[in-house]
Image (tube, rainbow, N blue to C red):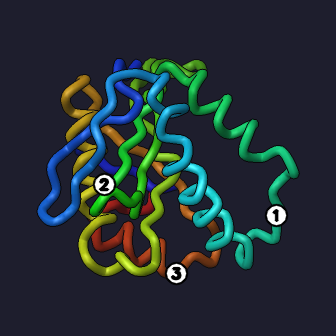
Amino acid sequence: MVAFGGESAAFLQGVALPGVELSVAASVEDAAARWADIEPLLRGIHEYHLPLTGVPLLDDWAERQRAHLVARTDGIFLLAIEDGRAVGFVNGWVSRNPSMFAETYARLDNIFVVDTHRGGGVGMQLVAAFEQRCAAIGIDEVRLGVVSGNALGERFWDAAGFVPV
């Protein structure tokens, strides 16, 4: 578990990044409208993690994931678009009093940048945009997990200022 101290109306949210335009969408329905952009990125993150996890996708994974994302009313999904092509995404959700504790935080579930754009700052900018979105809705803590053995991910989160807890 990694934490960072630092009910979303918009599912896909736009934030200006130098050299990369993030798509702007206003509602959960837009996840379905942008599915052609989102699906390859989700497949890409799975392919990246497959050697680490060994867990294959179900045959109907895309339909399941699409339904899950569209139904999630507490979700935050940022999509990085460059020259009309999706090059990365970050997604998560807001958790309010999820168990017996009085706490509110955002859970950053996934981040992925296509390999041609890694190292160019897109991932860091997506994280910053996710944190900005959280701050705008009153969330000052972001939590995430890193797949065991994901050295690239561990270096990225360390460079982004996240600390193991």
Q: Disc 2 marks which amino acid?
A: Val
> Please, what secondary structure does the residue beneath circle 1 have?
loop
Q: On the picture, is 60 further left or further right than 75?
A: right
* Label number found at residue 55: 1
- Residue at image position (29%, 62%) is 82
Q: Is residue 5 in sight in this rendering?
A: no
Q: Which residue is denoted by mark 2 in the rendering?
A: 127
The quadrant where residue 140 appears: top left
Q: Which residue is denoted by mark 3 in the rendering?
A: 151
Q: On the picture, is 159 further left or further right than 72?
A: left
Q: x, y percentage for residue 126? A: 30, 55
Gap in angstroms between the C-alphas marked 1 and 3: 18 Å
- Residue at image position (58%, 32%) is 69
Within 10 Å of the Cα at label 1, are there few (<14), some (14-19), or many (20+) other Cα atoms? few
Q: Do the residues bearing badges 1 and 2 touch, measured as CB atoms within 8 Å?
A: no
Sequence-earlier tag: 1 or 3: 1
Frontmost residue, 127 versus 157: 127
Q: Do the residues bearing badges 2 and 3 touch, measured as CB atoms within 8 Å?
A: no
